[in-house]
Image: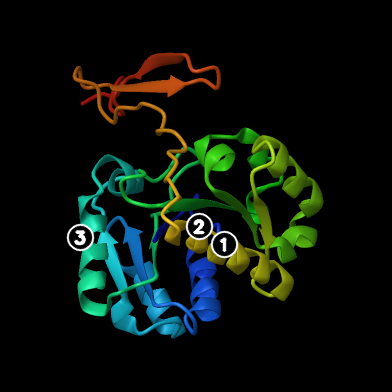
Amino acid sequence: MRLGVAGPVGTGKSSLIATLCRALSGELSLGVITNDIYTDEDARFLRSAGVLDPERIRPVETGACPHTAIRDDVTANLLAAEDLEADFGPLDLVIIESGGDNLTATFSPALVDAQLFVLDVAGGGDVVRKGGPGIARADLLVINKTDLGEHVGVDVERMTREGRDARQGSPVVALSRHDEASVRLLTGWVRDTLAHYRTGEHTPVDPGPMAPHFHAGQDGGETHAHTRTDGTTHTHDHAPAHAGQRA
C-alpha cells in the first residue's frame, strides 16, 4: 500500500513519518519517499533519525511546486516506489511525503492508495476552519503537536472538534509524538487501513484537485483562477512584478 502524507510547511510531516517508522518497522516491511523542491533534506533527516535502513528512504527532488509531483505528473514518485519494491520487496507499506504545500494540496489516487493531511496547532487554531480538499476529504486528518497548544494559545479540543465538523465525521487524530495514546491511534488507523487494503476491497478516493491556477499569464502578467467552496471558479490577473517600475 502507498500512503501519502501531505500538509503545509512545518506541520511535522517528517516527524510523523519517523514516528510511524519507529512504531511499525518491527512488524511491517517499510519504505519512505520524500519530496523536496531542490534538496533531499527530509530524507537526510529521516536517515539521521535511524528509523529505517537508510537505503529504504529515497528522496525525490520535484524541481517545481511540490504538488506537481504528487498530483500533476507523479512519474518520479512512481519510479521511486518501483525502485524500492525492486530492492526490498515485497514491501507492506510505502510512505510518500509531499513537499510542504498549501491547504489545497492532495495526492493523485494514481500515486497513493490512502492519504492523510497534517496540520499543527502552532499554525493557529483557526486554520482547520479554512477548509480545503485535504482537510475535508483526505482519508485522515492529523492535528499535530498538540503538546504545544498551551504555549501558542490554541484550544486543542476545539480545534479537533472543528476538524471533525469540517470532515463530517471522517476520522481525525490529535497527535503528539510524546503522547503514546495518540501515537497508538495513528498507528491503529494505519494498520486498519492496510488490513482493508489487503482484502482487495479498498478503493483510493480522490479528495479533489488543487484549485486551478497558472503561474504566468501569456501576456507577461500572472493569471490566477480560484475555485470557491460552492464549485464556481473566478479568475483575476496580476501585473508582472516589474510593472510600474522605471528602467
**What amino acid type is highlighted by mark number 1?**
Asp
Q: Decide which of tag 3 and tag 1 comes sooner along the chain.
A: 3
- The residue at which mark 1 appears reads as 192
Residue 6 in sight here: no
| 228 relative to 52 in the view: left or right | right
Q: Quadrant of the C terminus?
A: top left
- Please state the horizontal and vertical placement of residue 240, each as a whole percent of the image: 29, 25
Mark 2 vs 1: CB contact within 8 A: yes
Tally the marks.
Answer: 3
Mark 3 vs 1: CB contact within 8 A: no
- Please state the horizontal and vertical placement of residue 218, each as a whole percent of the image: 19, 20
Q: Quadrant of the N terminus?
A: bottom left
Vertical placement of residue 92 versus 194, above or below: below
- Please state the horizontal and vertical placement of residue 50, each as a whole percent of the image: 44, 85
- The residue at which mark 2 appears reads as 196
Rendered image quadrant of residue 145: bottom right
Report how far apart the C-alphas of labels 2 and 1 lie in the structure: 6 Å
Report how far apart the C-alphas of labels 3 and 1 lie in the structure: 27 Å
For disc 3, the neighbor class at 10 Å (few under 14, some 14 to 19, many from 20) is few
What residue is rendered at 21% in x and 22% in y?
220
- Please state the horizontal and vertical placement of residue 141, each as a whole percent of the image: 60, 50
- The residue at which mark 3 appears reads as 79
Report how far apart the C-alphas of labels 2 and 3 lie in the structure: 25 Å
| Secondary structure of residue under mark 1 | helix
What residue is rendered at 47% in x and 66% in y?
14
